[in-house]
Image: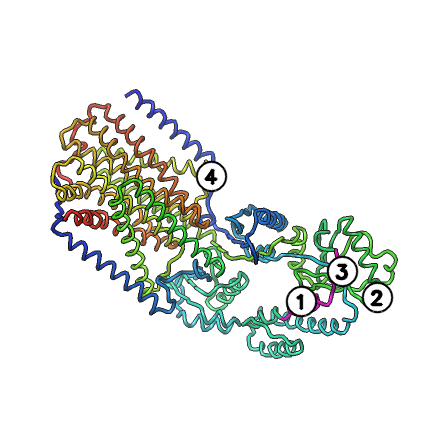
Amino acid sequence: MKRRQGWLFFIIFLLTLAIYLLINYPLQLGLDLRGGSQLTLQLIKEEGKVSKDELEAVKAVLDKRVNNLGVSESNLQTLGRDQLILELPGEQNPLVASRVLGKTALLEFRTQKIGTNSELKKLQLQRFKINDLIEEYTLLEQNKIVDDFNNINSLLNDIQLTLNYSSTSQDLFGKLIDTKLFINNQIANLFIKTDLSGKDLINAGRRQEQSNNNWEVLLTFSNEGGEKFAEITKSIAGSQQLLAIILDGESISEASVGSQFSNTGITGGLATISGNFSAEDARELEVQLKGGSLPLPIEIVETNTIGALLGSKNIIKSLYAAISGLIVVGIFMILNYRILGFVSVISLIFYGLFNLALYSLIPVTVTLPGISGLILSIGMAVDANILIFERIREELKRGNTLIRSIDSGFQRANSSIIDGHITTFVSCFVLFLLGTNFVKGFAATLGIGVAISLFTSLNCSKTILKFLTTYQSLRERNLYLKKESFL
Amino acid sequence: MNFFNLNLIKNKNKVFSFSLFLISFSLVGILYSTFNTTYKMPINLGMDFIGGNELRIERVCENECSNISPDKVVENLRKVSNNKNLVNNIKLQFQNDYKLISIRTPYLKIEESNNLINNLETVIGPLNDDSKNTRLIGPRLGKKLLLNSITSLLVSLFAISLYITIRFDRKYAFFALIALFHDLFIVFGIFSWLGILLSIEVNSLFAVSLLTIAGYSVNDTVVIFDRIRENLKLKETEYNETIQISINESFRRTIFTSITTLIPLLTLILFGSYSLFWFSISLSLGIIVGSYSSILLAPSFLLEIKN
């Protein structure tokens, strides 16, 4: 009896601790409960596996980009060996993030190959035309005028014919963008690489051009980068050769260097890129350049967006399900096992509290699948109680005393309970190791539930029952054994 | 003393026939699904596994939402959107008195998905962005998820088998595992049929439910086998008789634990979020089949051997 009293105090201590934890460290809710977007980014490597260093390097670059984007409370984590997860809580549109993060942003400075002038002029003219078409298309699209697309289509066909190119996209806009990309790639091929690249930048900024509404991006080179830039500009100053700024293999701007720079090149370590940028374009480029280029390309393989309203609805629905589940199970237990049922209800409440407290302690982010794991584990926690209570009833029916029945009931149900918990735990463990983020939430809560249930069903129930049986009035056999049970 | 008295010795063949029927039923579903459907798979794989775009959003209506036929919406979208590949593959549904609209398309980029929503607004009026739920899964990830789910299933089945073999002697372990595969096969088969008849798709949560059922089913069988072993040690009655008594002794317990697990699942089905609906259904099915196989099927195997 003394030992039991020790347990009683221990359980009361744990309960106080659990309540303290829950009050002071609120639960972390997943995006499916509070609304927000989640992007899964996959690192692409054609040959071999992605190494840990590469994953970390990509994450470092993306971290910088996310910070510069100014999204609040965002969270970037690695997932497995070759994936990253970005969470954007609230109403933030994943569109901008996906555009900024998805690009490799490899910045190069190239000088023009000699004797390619006529070729370049031809391509630049086509680019000018295609930009016009894109602008026209956007305007029509905004005003929902659909019939005029035929005109754009035929002009596009002319351009593609001149270039001897046909795009793979199905829709008109895709075709326009494809063609523009093709032209920019072709232009980039007319230029030769130099040793100056995005690595030589120490900062990037943007400003509005004075002459028109377009934006330009300002580059600040490191000392060494500034010297390289001066060297390059010096070599082509006053000549026919142009300097191109290439981003991810696409030429975004070509410029000549005036003959006044032929002695020293352009010094000062500053340069601007002006390529008809809109305010948004300029900002995105700025963020990408500040973060540096990605060591490996990435692809956005999954996007989940859940509105805030839907999130709060999900919380309410889950609460309804959990609470009504608990109540009905409680009623079922009390009807069938009377005072024993009452004991199981109390230990179930403890069980719920311990679970939630552990979530806030570890911490476990509570998601919808996580809640279903918890609700399911309620059923399993009751399982253990039923096993024990059935044994107690059998012992009582055999004519054993109450105290002896309780003791041997707990003892004899022990091995079955442990077996059952272990098989479930094995499933959870595998799920947690191999599962996706979504599945991990379920595995974690079910696994934790199974572990806690071992404690509450074996120890808490026993302690509460022992405590209750110290009262003479609660030792009536009728309170434990119904004369007629419905099964 | 017991209110039920199952005579398993006498009804053994009925149990076997019933299980045989369930298995053939599932097998037919799986075969039909593999050869006679558009997707040519044993089960209708959802967008988690093949990639795609899913959008659910509520309309903003003053009183009642006007009813529009889904075909008409798609027809109108064709006028607004130039992406023929997209518009030709849209599956569109209205729910809750035309308030909730759900759309499935092949995989789209985020930009395209955004365009789709904008286009939709021009066709059916304002939408409530706050109630939006979109999921885009690229085909590359889908393959990975499928592979992942299959590996998890195999690994944990192997781990459970290993545990059971160590824990019991080989005969018991073997029959517990047969019961387990019986349960999983039947749940799988039922979902094959649901795919054929109601176009229900399975996603990663379905794989999770199979894993959970595996743990649960073995657990149930272990409890009954434990009881049989315990009673056999006492040697009070003849072998077959002992098995029958053990089943009847654990019958109440097995039914009760199944009920207490089914109750929370039922509340999840009734009140929970729609994304957990089919997950809860498959778990419930697994628990029902699992209880049946632990009480009736697995012990019947033990009877057979003695005869």
3D distance between C-alphas at marks 4 and 3: 52 Å
The three-letter code of the residue at mark 3 reads: Gln
- Which chain is disc 3 placed on? A
Q: Earlier in the sequence, mark 1 or mark 2?
A: 1
3D distance between C-alphas at marks 1 and 3: 29 Å
Answer yes or no: is residue B134 visible: no
Label 2 sits on a secondary structure element that is loop
Label 1 sits on a secondary structure element that is helix
Q: What residue appears at the point 76 percent right and 65 percent down from the top-left corner?
A: A112
Residue matched to label 2: A239
Marks 1 and 3 on same chain:
yes
Q: Give the extent of the magenta segment.
A: A179-195
Give yes or no for residue A27 being in the magenta stretch. no
Q: Earlier in the sequence, mark 4 or mark 1?
A: 1
Q: Earlier in the sequence, mark 4 or mark 3?
A: 3
Q: Please tell me how crowded label 2 is: few (under 14), some (14-19), or many (20+) other residues with Cα within 10 Å.
A: some
The three-letter code of the residue at mark 2 reads: Ser
Give yes or no for residue A190 being in the magenta stretch. yes
Answer yes or no: is residue B137 visible: yes
**Residue A374: % across, % down:** 37, 43
State the image quarter where residue B278 is shown: bottom left
3D distance between C-alphas at marks 1 and 2: 23 Å
Q: Which image quarter holds the N terminus of chain B?
A: top left
Residue matched to label 4: A363
Residue matched to label 3: A210
